[in-house]
Image (cartoon, grey):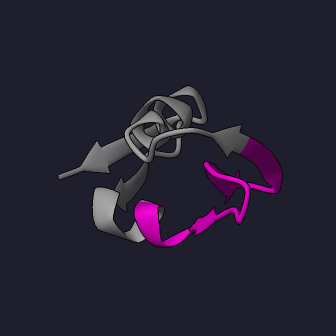
Amino acid sequence: MTMVKTASFESLIELAKENPEGGYTFILDGESYQINDVLEISKIATEHGYIVIY
């Protein structure tokens, strides 16, 4: 059986923590990402198999 994972864009943005030196640290499913813009979150979530709800 295939599991469908969904997440709201707003809830994903809450997972991004702003770094003092600029950019954000975003952790999803135990993996950490250094991103420059929160708009990168959708792409990362999609790669993890999530359907992002806006």
Q: Residue at x 31, y 57 (%)?
A: 9
| Numbered label tally | 0
Q: Residue at x 71, y 65 (%)?
A: 20
Q: Is residue 39 above or below residue 15?
A: above
In the rendered image, which quarter is residue 4 located in? top left
- Give coordinates of residue 24: x percent, y percent: 62, 54
Most foreground residue, 17 or 5? 17
Q: Is residue 1 visible?
A: no
Q: Is residue 35 visible?
A: yes
Q: Residue at x 55, y 34 (%)?
A: 44
- Give coordinates of residue 19: x percent, y percent: 69, 62
Residue at the extreme front: 21
Look at the image and give the residue range highlighted in magenta.
13-33
Q: Quadrant of the N terminus?
A: top right
Most foreground residue, 50 or 28? 28
Magenta stretch contains residue 29:
yes
Is residue 39 toward the left or the right of residue 5 in the image?
A: left
In the rendered image, which quarter is residue 15 located in? bottom right
Q: Residue at x 73, y 42 (%)?
A: 33
Most foreground residue, 16 or 21? 21
- Give coordinates of residue 18: x percent, y percent: 60, 65
Q: Is residue 21 above or below residue 37?
A: below
- Give coordinates of residue 6: x percent, y percent: 38, 54
Magenta stretch contains residue 23:
yes
